[in-house]
Amino acid sequence: MRSENNNPRESWRVFQIMAEFVEGFEKLGCIHPAVSVFGSARTPQEHPRYQKTVEISRLLSDSGFAVVSGGGPGIMEAANRGAQMGKSTSVGVNIQLPHEQLGNPYQDVSVDFKHFFARKVMFVKHAVAYVVMPGGFGTLDEFAEMLTLIQTGKSRNIPIILVESEFWSGLLEWFEEALNGNGMISPEDMDLIQVIDQPKQVVDAIFHHYEGRSLEPSAEEQEMLLRL
């Protein structure tokens, strides 16, 4: 016998999700070009990776890029902090969690989300590059999401830059041996990833990618982003 789900909360939840998208689009619509920075919420301020993230984000900001982070502590805080030191906008795309995620004080523009999937769209929508610092499951989730969107043609081809080669080398070796070696990805998919250690080289790599092309998405890419 078929059971009917008459819980009105499920229907109303659709409107809550819609509201999150509308607020995100309205608040971030003028934030471009932007670089999304990902990394661990557990990295303390005294850690060299925190300081490196501050420097990368300051350089990005002074180069004219708004910096978008997850709005929380650790690497996210460092990204927003560095952005505020520069000339461009510091953006926090915050998520409500039962623990660990508290908004950092370095956000010029802040948007709050309850749903991870709505929040992820905001990382993608206005980004011209992704910078991925060392992190845990959340960082890996975001990294895999960006890779998948570009690999499958659901998002424009923009730089995905992993910072700290020592941290990422084991994962990339596994990608090469287990995924590429078993035909689960194409060899050229590995070219979607860059590994860089020095802050200035991160910025240089982004500008190099856009030599001869606009930072703004083409009409075809605009249409692609509408179908995310």
Image (cartoon, rainbow, N blue to C red):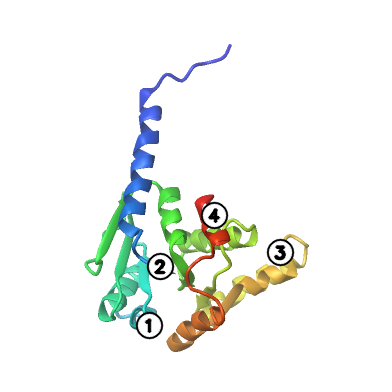
Q: For marks 2 and 4, give the CA distance.
A: 32 Å
Q: Which mark is residue 179?
A: 3
Instruction: Determine whether 35 is above or below 199 in the image.
Output: above
Which of the two discs, 3 and 1, sits closer to the camera? Answer: 1
- Categorize mark 2 by other alpha carbons within 10 Å: few (<14), some (14-19), many (20+): many
Which of the two discs, 3 and 4, sits closer to the camera? Answer: 4
Q: How many marks?
A: 4
Can I make out residue 20 in this image? yes
| Element type where label 4 sits in the image | helix
Can I make out residue 144 in this image? no
If you read the primary sequence from the N terminus, does the residue marked by circle 2 or circle 1 appear first?
2
If you read the primary sequence from the N terminus, does the residue marked by circle 3 or circle 4 appear first?
3
Q: Which residue is mark 2?
A: 40
Instruction: Determine whether 6 is above or below 114 in the image.
Output: above
**Residue 25 location in percent, x, y?**
36, 53
Which of the two discs, 2 and 4, sits closer to the camera? Answer: 4
Q: Which residue is mark 4?
A: 223
The answer to whether mark 3 and mark 2 are in CB contact below 8 A is: no
The answer to whether mark 2 and mark 1 are in CB contact below 8 A is: no
Q: Which mark is residue 63?
A: 1
